[in-house]
Amino acid sequence: MLYAIQHNDRAAPHNTTFASVQETCMHLHTVIYTDRLPEVEVFYRRAFPNVPFDAQEGMFTVRWASNGWLHFVRADAQHPPSAVALIRVHLPHTDLEHERLSALGIACGELTVESWGDWYGKNVRYFEVVDPTGTRLHFYEPHFGEKRQLMTTGDGTDTRKVHQPS
């Protein structure tokens, strides 16, 4: 399940750029201009069949999460094709998504663990997929290998403490 997205496109200033959903808790709309709209639609529908899509004349939208949209818009004279776009998509289990995409014959980079700084943690596991526009998709799992707090009880108690034997 894909549930957070971050966009980084410093090389194409005409694009809409937003910070991470996790950091801003706002709706995220990323626009990528392309002259390969039909190929983009085929790629995303094949790779992510359970993700909601919206296709309109001259535009194809991928809705990664309740607050993250990736809009592919037909390029024109005023908006040439975007370049050097990097989209980060947060996953709970990168290994499963890597295996699933690879089984579909989609070229995936190796699963890699790196430090991405304090926000993501010292162990971020990710892999890269490049879509038909050249947009680089980094599917990542932050704090890989670390114990992560998933829930707290109403009084703020860590659920791991609740389930530990006395």
Image (cartoon, rainbow, N blue to C red):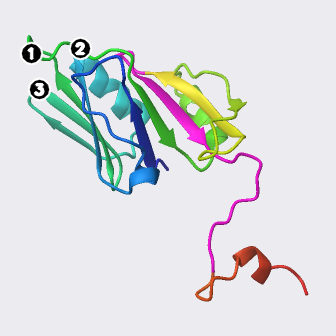
| Cα–Cα span, label 2 and label 1 | 10 Å
Alpha-carbon neighbours of circle 1 within 10 Å: few (<14), some, or many (≥20)? few
**Front-lying residue, 55 or 141:** 141
Nearer to us of marks 1 and 3 is: 1
> Which residue, given by chain and number where applicable, does mark 3 sit on?
58
| Cα–Cα span, label 1 and label 3 | 14 Å
> Which residue, given by chain and number where applicable, does mark 1 sit on?
78
Q: Amino acid at mark 3?
A: Gly
Q: Name the residue located 57 percent from the left edge and 22 percent from the top edge.
A: 108
Q: Secondary structure at mark 3?
A: loop
Nearer to us of marks 2 and 3 is: 2
On the rendered structure, is 29 left or right of 89?
Answer: left
Q: Amino acid at mark 1?
A: Gln
Q: Secondary structure at mark 1?
A: loop
**Front-lying residue, 64 or 11:** 11
Q: Amino acid at mark 2?
A: Pro
Q: The magenta stretch spans which residues? A: 131-152
Q: Magenta includes 76?
A: no
On the rendered structure, is 129 left or right of 9?
Answer: right
**Front-lying residue, 143 or 35:** 143
Q: Name the residue located 59 percent from the left edge and 47 percent from the top edge.
A: 119
Q: Where is residue 109 drawn, in percent x and y? A: 61, 21
Q: Which mark is residue 5?
A: none
Earlier residue among tags 1 and 3: 3
Q: Magenta includes 142?
A: yes
| Cα–Cα span, label 2 and label 3 | 13 Å
The C terminus - image quarter: bottom right
On the rendered structure, is 82 left or right of 109?
Answer: left
Q: Quadrant of residue 78?
A: top left
Q: Name the residue located 26 percent from the left edge and 21 percent from the top edge.
A: 13
Q: Where is residue 153 drawn, in percent x and y? A: 62, 83
> Which residue, given by chain and number where applicable, does mark 2 sit on?
81
